[in-house]
Amino acid sequence: MTLTAQRKHSRINIQIPGETRDKLAEVASLQGKKISALVRESIEEKIRRIERELFEEKMKTAYEGLSKENTRISEDFKYADSENLA
């Protein structure tokens, strides 16, 4: 489900360079879309990418924390494990 399917559209005004607007119009035309649809899709994609990056960063931090904890636990049992080898 896209973000736009979740609620009604809101109108916003943005300012972009004329050259960017021309490129945007060209790309929208090539894809058979209105400029507003292309901009909306681009914004939604950017939001998803940022959310994914934030999630991945949280997962990385959690993994690093678990890794440190596992290393500490391994150190605690290092001598107990070597006693079983004798």
Image (tube, rainbow, N blue to C red):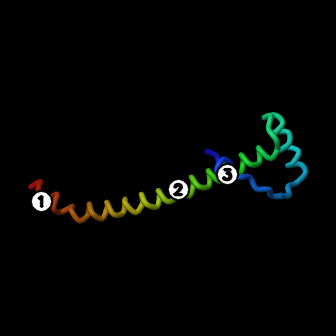
Q: Closer to the observer: label 2 or label 1?
A: 2
- Inspect the image, locate mark 3, and give the three-letter code of the amino acid beneath it: Lys
Label 2: which secondary element: helix
Q: Dot 1: few (<14), some (14–19), or many (≥20) neighbours within 10 Å?
A: few
- Inspect the image, locate mark 2, and give the three-letter code of the amino acid beneath it: Phe
Residue at 83% from the left image edge and 58% from the top image edge: 13
Residue 56: mark in rendering: none
Q: Is residue 50 left or right of residue 11?
A: left
The x, y position of residue 46, in whole percent, is 67, 51
For disc 1, the marked residue is 83
Residue at 74% from the left image edge and 52% from the top image edge: 9
Q: Is residue 74 left or right of residue 24?
A: left
- Inspect the image, locate mark 1, and give the three-letter code of the amino acid beneath it: Glu
The x, y position of residue 35, in whole percent, is 82, 44
> Quarter of the image containing the N terminus?
top right
The x, y position of residue 31, in whole percent, is 78, 35
The x, y position of residue 8, in whole percent, is 71, 52
- Counting residues from the start of the chain, the first of labels 2 and 3 encountered is 3
> Quarter of the image containing the C terminus?
bottom left
Residue at 47% from the left image edge and 57% from the top image edge: 60
Residue 46: mark in rendering: 3
Q: How many marks?
A: 3
Q: CA distance from mark 2 to mark 3?
A: 14 Å
Q: CA distance from mark 2 to mark 1?
A: 42 Å
Label 3: which secondary element: helix
Residue 55: mark in rendering: 2
Seen in the picture, residue 34 relative to 52 is either above or below; the reply is: above
Q: Is residue 23 left or right of residue 55?
A: right
Label 1: which secondary element: helix
Seen as rendered, the residue at the extreme right is: 18
Q: Say which quarter of the image contains residue 63.
A: bottom left
Seen as rendered, the residue at the extreme front is: 8
